[in-house]
Image (cartoon, rainbow, N blue to C red):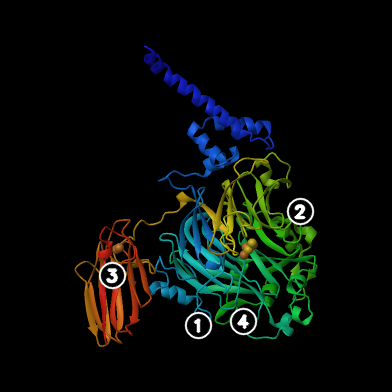
Amino acid sequence: MQSQSLQRYLPILVAALIVIVVLLAVVLIVRQPGEPAATPEATTAVAEEAAGLSGDAMAVAQERGLTPDDVIAALKTYIPTGKPDEYIMFSSGGHSGQVLVIGLPSMRLLKVIGVFTPEPWQGWGYGAEETMKVLEEGRVDGKEITWGDTHHPALSETAGDYDGQFLFINDKANARVAVIDLRDFETKQIVKNPIAINDHGGAMVTPNTEWVIEGGQYATPLAWEYASLDDYADAYRGMVTFWKFDRDKGRIIPEESFAMELPPYWQDLCDAGKKVSEGWVFCNSFNTEMSTGGVEEGNPPFEAGASQRDMDYLHIINLKKAAEVAAAGQVKQINGFNVITLDTAIAEGLLYFAPEPKSPHGVDVTPGGDYLVIAGKLDPHVTVYSFEKIQKAIESGAAEKDQYGVPILSFDDVVETQIEVGLGPLHTQFDDKGYAYTSLFLDSAVARWTLGGPYQELHDDPAWSLVTKIPVHYNVGHIAAAEGDTVSPDGKYLVSLNKWSVDRFVSVGPLLPQNFQLIDISQPGDQLQLLYDMPIGIGEPHYAQIIKADKLQPWDVYPEIGWNPHTQSKDPNAVEAGQERVERNGNTVEIWMTAVRSHYNPERIEVKKGDRVIWHITNIERAKDATHGFALPGYNINLSLEPGETVTFEFTADQDGVYTFYCTEFCSALHLEMTGYFLVQP
Ligand code: RUQ
Ligand code: CUA
């Protein structure tokens, strides 16, 4: 009888106990003793949300010391297994010379695309002919360069919106631009700028990707010829290059590209006009003082010498007209490249200056193309220029000229407004609610402020005013908002690309990883929430762009067996099953091999020392998880053969011996058996 009633009441008792534990946990978690209380509204909201957590979840949150905000942040970023991310961020890989592909909001690293630097997993730069060719295009005066300082990725655009087809990125160190095809996420081309040894203001694209912009940085004589620093003003020059992009070919066409010679001010970031300002390009500059350094000789160091003037020059470039001038042949050939000289640029009305305060860094065009936002590292304001006012000022003629004869528009004529946002403003992004976001390097914060004019109707705050700031950790450089530099930004997320991660992660020695911080910008007003920290342990990324994931349409497998990813067509040396063979022609041995789970065919290759070996391998698989690797020890050959791909590599068998080649991807249960012998007779 007794045990019966216990059985009946036990579930009720247990349920009551769980309720009490949950309530207690809610109280504990919402208000930890000694901690300042949250605002009453926030507490209620969080308590309500937190009450929805089960006892187990509460216990976990409590055990891990998570605050209600932490729990919300976790819920906003967690992606269950098997579910894809909503956005993809393409980030510069900094010194690694690569591009990082990161899912948002989970901040999971999906891929590191080999670009300027050899990348073993993708077999990028380890023998495969097409990868060697691309890396060779990036040589500087014939010299092999095995790294890059990648700064600004740029997704291809159609009508000012990301179209998900191509990605471009610059290498600041060597003035190079790379083209990545987003059908297979592989680098297809590297162009070396023929007139500049370094760059910075690239890559940026025009709204329909006709042009990829590469702005310069530290001035040198064009084509980096020797000239004494005593002749700086006469012999040194800046530049901006417009690379012609052929979308069908998926390549930059150097012969149809051109550069514009600029005074030896240090051009910095550029942005392309869009909508009303389409056809124009805007670049910052600093060191209009033309300081040449020499601290060792008692001169002011660059940091002081280049920061004396209150104003530098915003470069306003009529790209549409410049392209016509270049097409008409009004160019000079410098190192085999089309260059519009400074004199031609001035005479044809292609170039104007407007003063910009003080050591400017970022220039960012608003979604409608109607304003440009410029942030000066040493000025707490952002300065907003009106494109309409710029056009009027150009029409009415500039009164002043710089020492090279470039017309200078008057500051008051072209500026719309200035907004004090904080210390060290750098870069600006936009959202769908009429807000702009500016990174504050010295404040270690991101400022949210309002746009006026046509954007006024999107928000309830006063026009052109600071709304709020969210602290980030810590020195923030660029920020990237979801599609935040296009004609139709999404809002939702913003990533703060912070330099160094002081006090953020477990120490990994004196070289600190960088830190990406994900911020929820979906709510209006002062509601910004920091959601997630992601350490980046591969270099110092500068810029990133965030695209809606469903805009990308990558291939699952290559379209046909025997595909050459470089030509994006069937390779003449594609090998079909049954056609495998080895042919000798004098001292040349040519091999046509297939790879399929889990063997190569042929499995034995025998050559003589000194033979030239030409080796083609086709992965004849059609399944989407059937990548095979190919490693040839001792010869530094390492390939990745994605389903359908044909790869060719060539080498001289200059070491005799027995070499075992094998597959480097765990492709099946019998993957270890996917191997073969390469015998080199003495
Ligand atoms: S940079 S942190 Cu764009 Cu190369 Cu400003
Ligand atoms: Cu193919 Cu392992």
Tell me whether circle 3 and circle 4 mark residues in contact (CB < 8 Å): no
Tell me whether circle 2 and circle 3 mark residues in contact (CB < 8 Å): no
The label number, if any, that marks residue 142 in the structure image: 1
For label 1, being within 8 Å of ligand 1 is answered: no
- The residues tagged by marks 3 and 1 sit, at their Cα atoms, a distance apart of 31 Å
Amino acid on which disc 4 is placed: Trp
Marks 2 and 3, the one that precedes in the sequence: 2
Pointer 4 residue: 224
Pointer 2 residue: 418
Marks 4 and 2, the one that precedes in the sequence: 4
Drawn side of residue 421 relative to residue 605, left or right: right
Look at the numbered disc 2 and give the secondary structure of its residue: strand
Pointer 3 residue: 574
Q: Which residue is drawn at 35% across and 77% down?
A: 634
Q: Which residue is drawn at 28% across and 62% down?
A: 671
Look at the numbered disc 3 and give the secondary structure of its residue: loop
Mark 2 neighbour class, 10 Å CA radius: few under 14, some 14 to 19, many 20 or more: some
| Figure check: 566 above or below 53 | below
Look at the numbered disc 1 and give the secondary structure of its residue: loop
